[in-house]
Amino acid sequence: MGFRATPRVRSLHSFPGITVAQIDEEVAKLLQLKAQIGGDDGKHQFVLKTAKGTRDYNPKQMAIREKVFSTIIGCFKRHGAETIDTPVFELKETLTGKYGEDSKLIYDLKDQGGELLSLRYDLTVPFARYLAMNKITNIKRYHIAKVYRRDNPAMTRGRYREFYQCDFDIAGQYDAMIPDAECLKIVHEILSGLDLGDFRIKVNDRRILDGMFAVCGVPDDKFRTICSTVDKLDKMPWEDVRKEMVNEKGLSEEAADQIGEYVSLQGGMDLAERLLQDQKMSQSKQACAGLSDIKLLFSYLQLFQATDKVVFDLSLARGLDYYTGIIYEAVLTQAGVATVSTEAQNGAEESVSVGSVAGGGRYDGLVGMFDPKGRKVPCVGVSIGIERIFSIMEQKAEAAAEKVRTTEVQVMVASAQKNLLEERLQLVSELWNAGIKAEVMYKKNPKLLSQLQHCEESGIPLVAILGEQELKDGVVKLRVVASREEPISL
């Protein structure tokens, strides 16, 4: 293969003192560049991979995913929700300042046509914008769509840069804790229905947290940043959280130790009653209002038969800035479920936890941030962590060597002899027109064995067999693929 000298190489000859070795070095660089961009045919050598933090889903994975979506949507509809959709990107200013320290994870887009845009970070802020823009004061809605976070992906734990969220929200002025209790009941129903194993729904209230920070001596301007640190307690031990509060956030050791005493508490209605009598907490009106609502919430959850999985946990913080009242998070608790097995230092396999699988809370001030007159619409909602749930369901299917059907075909139209293509096409068309899911092989004269093997591989339960004798008699043999019985002639 010859190499034609480029202007850069030719120009080197005109410089005095340039050695052959230097020219050879430049030629080698150009040859390397040429190899990277492709051969003489000009074809670019593509790197075949998905972008960081994203993935493809094969038909088996999509079948599992659709089953999960069906369970979730069924629950949302059972509770009377209607659905909406919003654009995948919003004006940058719509999203800015709504997520606290997580705002750095927003994907900004290049200026296109004079608008500064960002990919949506969640479905809650677009929902609040939608309510304010359309002057809607009450709605019960669900929304299932992709969101984007410029995060450091941990794909083995179901954490991606592009992923689906399944949101359910109730907007409107209602009596305290009734919509909130329904949101928790929905999480309870979905996680029970998906059969993921044991789980806990941790509950707290932003007002309790803020009251706790105040009585423990946290300065007002540090509430949100300390809240974000407390939110890391599910991933870090208390010693590390305390160190971050004191060394990085500038909190006094005394205040940090007082916070440590409270965030270690867990319980139910009894804990809320005990804290209402607590010498310090009772000094905060905010905390007392939150504790009273927690008591009310548990009374409604008893009526909903959902208290078996709900725990009042003072360490739950949820770092998003827009929460104003109750907050909650669901986590799987059984030891056996993990999305991946990794080699531990001793060579044995260890389970990797998946973190929370649902979360949400009350955000009464968010819609007012978009309304020109600042009119508030109280809202409470929950988001189901579909990617993490899907990772677990996929792992369970693999562990059980479960055969997952990727199509819903009910009948295969087959022929026992040659030259029956037209008859097969005619019959499959009649089945389609009757609303029956049916399939036919795309060959003029397929072997019967090949057609039956396709049914077994695809899990098609029935095969309608055409033959010359059947056509004379005006019947079709219907065979059950699994048992090979032919109970019916139609």
Image (spheres, rainbow, N blue to C red):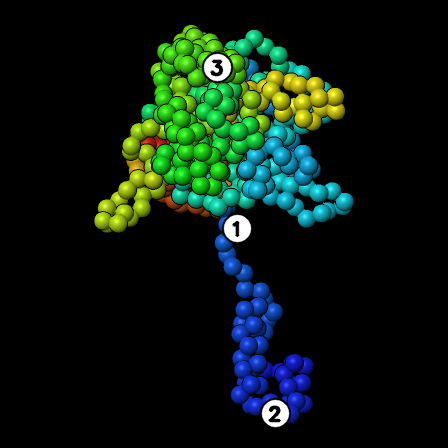
Q: Quadrant of residue 195?
A: top left
**Going from the N terminus, do you reach mark 1 or mark 2 first?**
2
Q: Nearer the viewer, mark 1 or mark 2?
A: 2
Toward the viewer: 242 or 298? 242
* Pointer 2 with pointer 3, Cβ within 8 A: no
Badge 1 or badge 3: first in the primary sequence: 1
Query: What SS does tag 2 mark?
Result: loop
User: Which residue is located at x 49 percent, y 32 percent?
Assistant: 226
Q: Tell me the element at label 1.
A: loop
Q: Nearer the viewer, mark 1 or mark 3?
A: 3
What residue lies at 54% left-to-right and 82% top-to-bottom?
25
Q: Residue at x 67, y 26 (%)?
A: 369
In this view of the protein, which residue sits in the foreground, 390 or 118? 118
What kind of element bears circle 3? Answer: helix
Closer to the eye: label 2 or 3: 3
Give the labeled residue for mark 3.
283
Category of crowding for the residue at label 2, using alpha-carbon neighbours closer than 10 angstroms: few (below 14), some (14–19), many (at least 20): few
Residue tagged 1: 51
The image quarter containing residue 446 is top left
Q: Which residue is mark 2?
A: 17
Inter-mark Cα distance, 2 to 3: 85 Å
Hey, what amino acid is under mark 2?
Gly
Percent position of residue 258, x then y = 40, 26
- Which amino acid type is marked by label 1? Ala
Quarter of the image where the N terminus is located = bottom right
Regarding residue 428, the answer to whether it shows in the image is no
Give the Cα separation between the discs numbered 1 and 2: 47 Å
Q: Gap in Å between the C-alphas at discs 1 and 3?
A: 52 Å
